[in-house]
Image: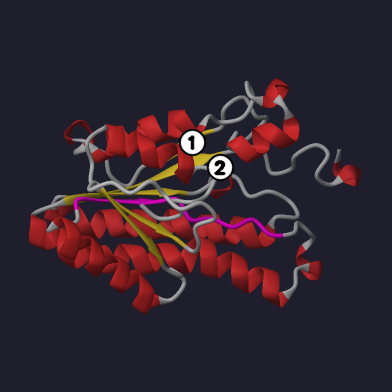
Amino acid sequence: MTGASGGLGRVVLPMFLEAGYGVAAVALDWEERPVLSPALLPMKADLTKPAEARAAVAKTVERFGRLDCVVHLVGYFGPESPIEEISDETFTRTIEVNLRAAFHMIRAAVGPMRAAGGGRMVLVGSTVAEQPVVTWGAFSAAMGGLKALVQVASAELRKDGITVNLVNPSSIYTPAVGEALGAAEAGRWVKPEAMGALMLWLCSEAGADVSGASIAMPGRMEHPAYVWPGVVPELK
């Protein structure tokens, strides 16, 4: 599991452990030291670097003997602005974190999963993959690319018994969001527990026939839409 120390990872990681999975939990950094468990292998890695993605997969196989699932939770959302105002740094970081890291993980996982006779890959994107949003040019490009990558990987790996699926939430009601916005917003945003339950199902035998899916989880947000009211005031 990647992005394991983030707001979504802190909810989904315990769900997989409780379901009986051995979990290699990858994070760029750990603010809090994870509770040690024989079923948990915490590690640090920058997955925008291909060598570190390969090393994370190798350590997983070394510890658990095989790689059955990749649950990829890494994501980054930078400053929003019209295309002519997007900086090179923002565009590059958005593509690196949201698309290149996913590519590195998918590529690194193929060999071990083929050796195991199959596997599951579940990645987190955004509803923006279905409908780009004005002023979110970099993020929309990254999410559109991620959706295409998942669909191609699914088509290429289906014969090997490897499924690849994309879960597309709108805004996720993580603990940090809850502290910032309060409980009043909880009913509109996507619950991380709901995402975790879907990921567990996609990783299970019951989800074996689902691959190449781009599953929208909008919660009760007003989306999809090319323009969100309030994002660009003059376009209301």
Quadrant hosting residue 19: top left
Mark 2 belongs to which amino acid?
Answer: Thr
The answer to whether mark 2 and mark 1 are in CB contact below 8 A is yes
Q: Which residue is mark 2?
A: 127
Q: Is residue 2 above or below residue 108?
A: above
Task: Specify start and end residues of the magenta stretch as a single range.
Answer: 68-78
In this view, the residue farthest toward the right is: 234
Locate residue 206 relative to residue 131 in the image: left or right.
left
Asked whether residue 157 appears in the rendered view, the answer is yes
Q: In the rendered structure, which amino acid carries the disc numbered 1? A: Ala
* Residue sitting at x 19%, y 38%: 208
Query: In the rendered view of the protein, which quadrant contains the C terminus?
Result: top right
Q: Nearer the viewer, residue 158 or 199?
A: 199
Residue 212, position in %: x, y? 32, 47
x, y percentage for residue 195?
A: 44, 34
Front one among 32 and 105 = 32
From where the camera sits, is residue 171 visible?
no
Image spot of residue 107 (x, y percent): 29, 68
Quadrant position of residue 176: top right
* Residue 74, magenta (yes or no): yes
User: On screen, 56 above or below 25?
Assistant: below
Going 69% across and 34% down the picture, which residue do you hit?
179
Name the residue tied to disc 1. Answer: 216
Q: Is 89 contained in the magenta span?
A: no
Report whether 8 appears left or right of 43: right
Residue 233 disc label: none
Q: Regarding mark 1 in the picture, which secondary structure is present there?
A: strand
Query: Which residue: 69% across, 44% down?
Result: 226
In this rendering, position of residue 64 left or right of residue 72: left
**Total marks placed:** 2
42 left or right of 188? left
